[in-house]
Amino acid sequence: MSSTAIGTERPSAVTARDLARATATRTRRSAHVKLWAGAVCTALVVVPVALANVLPLPGANAQDLSRRRLPPLSEGHLLGTDQLGRDLLSRILHGGQVSLTVGVLAVLVSGLIGIAAGAAAGFFGGWVDALVSRFLEAQLALPLLMMLLLVVALFGPSVAVITCVIAVAQWPEVARLTRSLVLVEREKPYVAAARVLGLRAWQVLLRHVIPNVVRPASLVVLLLLAQAVLLESALSFLGAGPQRPFATWGRIISDGQAYITTSWWLVTLPGLVIALLVVGVNLLGDGLRDRTRRRKGAGA
């Protein structure tokens, strides 16, 4: 091809602006799909669990040995029965109330601790930052599940103890993110302006800095809900969860593992409920995070 032909080539009709718009469109659609899929998956678990006490279901602990290990879609038992003739759907829904209560309370407590500690470390720096950072490093160096089992063994497997243990185990993740966000916020002009106006450091932190970092930090707290439910289920599966008569998801799976080769639904169905909730919460959190990033990019 001659140099004249090369020099007369027409420029591409696709500009950099068009590419940016196409990328933004794909990101927006992806975030929208994640939000809807996550909301649907989460609602499929949370709504029936919340309505478990008003639904026409047998008692979660009502035994009928003549109807042991009935398969799903049996008469009067949508998901079948367990090894003691108890309705599996009722046990899953009522067990979900305990598991979700522990998970929600744990992430709320861990979120408050993490945001407070991370904000103080990032804003004040110095010995406060050093102290919080050393606590973070010390806790992250410990095996998580072993630490949880040790604390539960020392203080007992009550709902309050397990909630506090999971909260303490999860606060470092919130604190690290909050600290990094506050390090960026404290260098912005509005912080200097607030100090010039005579506000004290703690007033600037509480009134101006923390409100600007709560939203991204709360997304991490939402994602920690799935981890909290998994931790509670793991503790219950190992026998260190809330004791009877509480029917948690982990205990339901633990009780049915001896019958997995003959009665697969005793383990599979509770496991699918946990998986559906974890996938739903993760998709919901990812969708909200993508939407927040897109808004920040548009604002910039």
Image: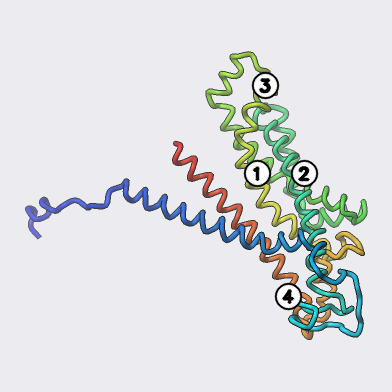
* Residue 268: mark in rendering: 4
Callouts 4 and 2 close, C-beta under 8 Å: no
Instruction: Kindly identify the amino acid type of the residue bearing the numbered disc 3.
Output: Ala
Q: Are marks 1 and 3 in contact (CB under 8 Å)?
A: no
| Nearest to the observer: residue 181 or residue 71 | 71
Question: Is residue 269 depicted above or below 22 in this figure?
Answer: below
CB under 8 Å between discs 3 and 2: no
Secondary structure beneath disc 1? helix
Quadrant of the image containing the N terminus: bottom left
Instruction: Compare residues 262 and 42 and report the one nearer the observer.
Output: 42
Label 4 sits on a secondary structure element that is helix
Q: In the rendered view, does 118 fall on the left or right side of 1?
A: right
Above or below, 137 against 255 in this view is: above
Q: Mark 1 belongs to which amino acid?
A: Ser
In-front residue for pair 231/132? 231
Q: Amino acid at mark 4?
A: Thr
